[in-house]
Structures are given as C-alpha cells and as structure tokens.
Image (cartoon, rainbow, N blue to C red):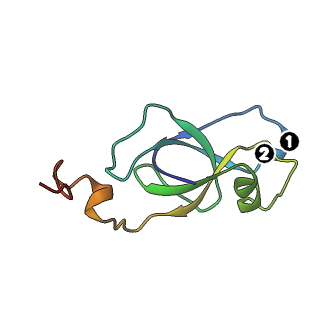
Amino acid sequence: MFLGKVVGTVWSTKKVENLRNLRMLLVHPVNLKKKTNEDLVVVADVVGAGVGEMVICAYGHAARMAVGQDKDISIEAAVVGIVDELEAGPDYRGDRPDDAGKED
C-alpha cells in the first residue's frame, strides 16, 4: 500500500470491457513528510475520492479485491481509503534534529 494525493481524473472512451464501470484517478504517491515522489499512478477509484484528497492505495491482488474482483480485471492499483488525518512520530515526520539520539 501507499499514500498518495489525487491530482486528477483519467478519462478514456475506449477501454477493455472489465474497466467500463470504473472511475480512474491520477495519484501522486507521497512520503510521510507529504513530499511527492516523481512518478504518477493511475488507480481505480471505488470509494469516491476527489482531486486534492490524500488517499490510501493498494497494489495487485489487494487492489483487485477492493473493486470486487480477485482476478480477471485489468487494474494494478486502487484507492481503498480516504485519509482523514495522519499521525506519525518525529522520526517519520522529519522533525528530529540530525544529531538526535546520538551519544557524545
């Protein structure tokens, strides 16, 4: 799984049959410092996420399960939750000084 920010919607008029009723979003993966990575990911949306929202995305089998299919669907990633709030300790937020925890 990964966290990401929804940055857009993907529209496609021609697609395989098993994608016909799926909404696709463009998601920018982020780290816990909320800095974006360079790559964008196209994900199926089954929870109704919108542009600007932070989301939880799943890959592979977990993504296919989220859309109600455990196989035979042409997706690799799906939104499985919308983030209301993030809470992480200073080691993960980047608040810790470079020398914290070092002994003199």
Instruction: Indicate left or right for 3 with 33 as reference.
Output: right
Residue 22 vs residue 38, the one in the foreground: 38
Quarter of the picture containing the C terminus is bottom left
Q: Amino acid at mark 1?
A: Glu
Residue 103 vs residue 43, the one in the foreground: 103
What residue is pinned by disc 2? 20
Q: Local crowd at mark 1 within 10 Å, few (<14), some, or many (≥20)?
A: few
Mark drawn on residue 102: none
Q: Residue at x 88, y 48 (%)?
A: 72
Q: Local crowd at mark 2 within 10 Å, few (<14), some, or many (≥20)?
A: few
Q: Amino acid at mark 2?
A: Arg
**Image location of residue 102, percent across then percent down:** 19, 55
Q: Residue at x 71, y 57 (%)?
A: 62
Q: CA distance from mark 1 to mark 2?
A: 5 Å
Residue at the farthest front position:
104
**Image location of residue 31, percent across then percent down:** 40, 48
Q: Residue at x 65, y 59 (%)?
A: 46
Instruction: Indicate left or right for 83 with 59 as reference.
Output: left
Instruction: Indicate left or right for 70 with 26 as reference.
Output: right
**Image location of residue 48, percent across then percent down:** 57, 60
Circle 2 — which element? loop
Quarter of the picture containing the N terminus is bottom right
Residue at the farthest left position:
104
Residue 8 vs residue 43, the one in the foreground: 43
Residue 90 quadrant: bottom left
Circle 1 — which element? helix
Q: Residue at x 37, y 68 (%)?
A: 85
What residue is pinned by disc 1? 17
**Image location of residue 35, percent across then percent down:** 33, 43
The reply to whether the C-beta atoms of the residues labelled 1 and 2 are less than 8 Å apart is yes
Residue 38 quadrant: top left
